[in-house]
Amino acid sequence: MPRTLPTSLTLGSLVVDTPVVLAPMAGITNAAYRRLCAEQGAGLYVCEMITSRGLVEGDQHTRDMLVFDELETVRSVQLYGTDPVYVGKAAEILCAEYGVAHIDLNFGCPVPKVTRKGGGGALPWKRVLLGQILEAAVAAAAPYDVPVTMKTRKGIDEDHLTYLDAGRIAQESGVAAIALHGRTVAQAYSGEADWDAIARLVDHVDIPVLGNGDIWEAGDALRMVEQTGAAGVVVGRGCLGRPWLFRDLAAAFAGEQVATLPTLGEVTGMMRRHAELLSRHMGEVRGCKEFRKHVSWYLKGFAAGGELRRSLGLVDSLAALDALLAELDPTEPFPTAELGTPRGRQGSPRNRVVLPEGWLDDTDGSDCGLQEDAGEATGG
Ligand SMILES: Cc1cc2nc3c(=O)[nH]c(=O)nc-3n(C[C@H](O)[C@H](O)[C@H](O)COP(=O)(O)O)c2cc1C
């Protein structure tokens, strides 16, 4: 029997008017990008990951990342941490000083630098420690009525799966929802996301499960929800260079079929808007520099020549950007062959996940005294 599609998403006290979440992406989902996406659609737009210790110790780089657009009424932040004390204090700071309405905890990062220290996707292996971290965050956020969610992967590798236990522990700890990226740490971004695992987690827990992995078009989001029973979707790479995907997603969950196919002129308009928002938040020089990494995503599949792409990749002012964008043919239609295809990171699987010595020997972790990182911001 076909499932009824969710039309909104409830995370504790927070009701999101469409069941769509912008995945936290380090170096991408800053205030400018969140605003750009929010201008297109509806949903929850999560700030890039910040470290608990960095926040607690007042690290300037961490504080600089906690910037919100004036139109951003729902502030949502992802925290990284391996120590319950730091995570609890950081959650308290986010609620008390930054007025956040949602905190997500990162337990999915596959970066060796992070897993080597037992963080990110390695941490859920230590079930007791995971529970302690989740409880600390929930307890700190509860007086502010701020929901805490967790985001994780299937496990370290196929022989060391953690997601079902993580779901149970999250539920017992008072976590409002769990997002599952249907890959293991060992897979990094390779292969295909396992949506069956998302369905298994939905069956295993009573809290809302958010499905994540390989949503390239709005139709994929509907398919994921239909196949898995997820309460909503988390969209990452699919919206790189395509913020209008959020328009299509909002329409899809409202029962309409919209597939935005912007002409190159409309895409350059979006690029200009993105660079302008970045400049507004970071200053023009840094904003334009930040914008460079998005150029190839916006132009993917369009006929723009190599020379022009290279110049755009070096753009250092809005005036220079305007001059370069003016060289593109505004009437060029959207390259429909790009639809439904992967974009952003893909890479290859890892032979071995780097872990602290003896990490897999037991699943407790309550006394393993992980060193909490202050400046780890490499994402998930
Ligand atoms: C550039 C980049 C940065 C990321 N940074 C984070 C992060 O900081 N925290 C996190 O939980 N996941 C991070 N991720 C993972 C995404 O949130 C998402 O789980 C993953 O890309 C799978 O979803 P997708 O197939 O929709 O892209 C990152 C992914 C990319 C591509």
Image (cartoon, rainbow, N blue to C red):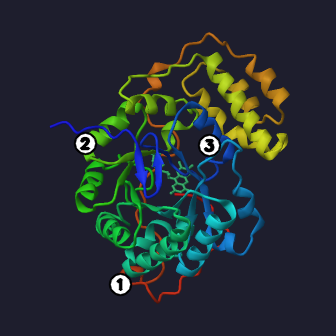
Q: Of the residues shown, which amino acid type is indicated by label 2?
A: Gln
Identify the residue shown where x is 56% and y is 66%. 144
Is ligand 1 closer than 8 angstroms to the Cβ of mark 2? no
Establish if 66 lies above or below 247.
below
Q: Secondary structure at mark 2?
A: helix
From the viewer's side, name the closer residue of 176 and 65: 176
Identify the residue shown where x is 41% and y is 47%. 9
Residue 131, image quadrant: bottom left
Q: Residue furthest bottom?
A: 367
Could you say where residue 74 lies in the image, as x and y percent from the top left?
Answer: 59, 49
Q: Is residue 28 visible?
A: yes
From the viewer's side, name the closer residue of 306 and 356: 356
Identify the residue shown where x is 25% and y is 38%. 4
- In the rendered structure, which disc, 3 or 1, sits on the residue that comes first in sequence? 3
Pointer 3 with pointer 1, Cβ within 8 A: no
Establish if 364 lies above or below 276.
below
For residue 63, which numbered disc appears in the image? Answer: none
Q: Secondary structure at mark 1?
A: helix
- In the rendered structure, which disc, 3 or 2, sits on the residue that comes first in sequence? 3
| Left or right of 166 in this view: 259 | right
Pointer 3 local density, CA inside 10 Å: few below 14, some 14–19, many at least 20: many
Could you say where residue 344 lies in the image, as x and y percent from the top left?
Answer: 53, 41
Pointer 2 with pointer 1, Cβ within 8 A: no
Name the residue that disc number 3 marks: 34
Identify the residue shown where x is 67% and y is 61%. 98
Q: Of the residues shown, which amino acid type is indicated by label 1?
A: Asp
| Left or right of 162 in this view: 312 | right
Name the residue that disc number 2 marks: 227
Could you say where residue 349 lies in the image, as x and y percent from the top left?
Answer: 41, 55
Name the residue that disc number 1 marks: 361
Q: Of the residues shown, which amino acid type is indicated by label 3?
A: Arg
